[in-house]
């Protein structure tokens, strides 16, 4: 993925990357104001049952993919991993293909319980000041190999699709 040093002024500072096409497989659901607090339970179920055991899993990174966001803030959330193919996956796993896009990539520092604040900073502060437009594509959290689910701290990034 190509990186650039492009940085708009104000708010959290991203780097920009051209993301690749990916296949993500995992557990998902529809979440809104009433049940958004249940997303960590989705990860609690996915991790022990599937992480490292998904057929065709590409590496040790995990993805929290947000898609189909509506005006009320409801969204589909998929907790999963990148796979090389959708063949041989357990029926319970949701499959999602991500097309290549340009992304603004933001580092999330600190405990994962504060990731909602990072998302809000991006949408309330950075996006209006950047004058960028969102691309019509899923955004995602990427949990790097250094992320430690036992203490919920580590390498976490938020990838927001933007128009060129």
Image (cartoon, grey):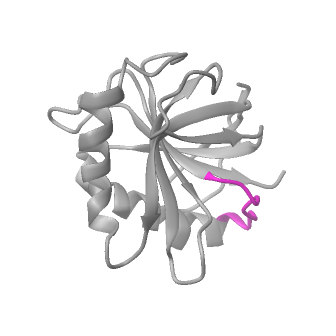
Residue 81 percent across, percent down from the top left: 48, 30
Front-lying residue, 105 or 79? 79
Q: Quadrant of residue 58?
A: top right
Front-lying residue, 7 or 48? 48
Front-lying residue, 28 or 140? 28
Residue 38 percent across, percent down from the top left: 27, 61
Q: Name the side, left or right, on which 164 lies relative to 114.
A: right
Q: Residue furthest left?
A: 151
The residue drawn where x is 64% and y is 72% is 128
Residue 137 percent across, percent down from the top left: 71, 55
Q: Name the side, left or right, on which 103 lies relative to 82.
A: right
The residue drawn where x is 68% and y is 45% is 103
- Quick check: can you spot residue 158? no
- Quick check: can you spot residue 123? yes
Q: Is residue 12 above or below residue 110?
A: below
Q: Is residue 52 above or below residue 152?
A: above
Q: Which residues are magenta?
A: 130-138
Decide whether residue 135 is among the magenta residues. Answer: yes
Q: Name the side, left or right, on which 112 lies relative to 89.
A: left
Quadrant for the N terminus in the image? top right
Q: Name the side, left or right, on which 38 lies relative to 79.
A: left
Residue 133 percent across, percent down from the top left: 76, 65
Q: Quadrant of residue 45?
A: top left
| Chief secondary structure of the magenta portion | loop
Q: Residue furthest front?
A: 91
The residue drawn where x is 76% and y is 58% is 135
Decide whether residue 140 is among the magenta residues. Answer: no
The residue drawn where x is 48% and y is 48% is 78
């Amino acid at each position: 993925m190509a990186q650039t040093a492009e940085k708009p002024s104000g708010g959290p500072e991203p780097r920009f990357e051209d993301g690749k096409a990916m296949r993500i497989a995992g557990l998902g659901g529809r979440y809104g104001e009433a049940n958004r607090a249940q997303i960590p339970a989705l990860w609690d179920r996915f991790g022990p049952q599937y992480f490292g055991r998904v057929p065709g899993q590409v590496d040790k990174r995990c993805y929290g993919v947000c898609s189909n966001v509506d005006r009320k803030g409801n969204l589909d959330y998929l907790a999963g991993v990148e796979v090389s193919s959708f063949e041989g996956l357990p029926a319970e796993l949701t499959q999602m293909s991500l097309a290549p896009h340009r992304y603004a990539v933001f580092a999330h520092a600190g405990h994962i319980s504060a990731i909602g604040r990072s998302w809000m900073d991006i949408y309330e502060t950075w996006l209006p000041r950047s004058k960028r437009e969102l691309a019509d594509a899923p955004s995602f959290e990427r949990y790097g190999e250094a992320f430690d689910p036992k203490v919920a701290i580590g390498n976490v990034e938020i990838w927001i699709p933007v128009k060129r």
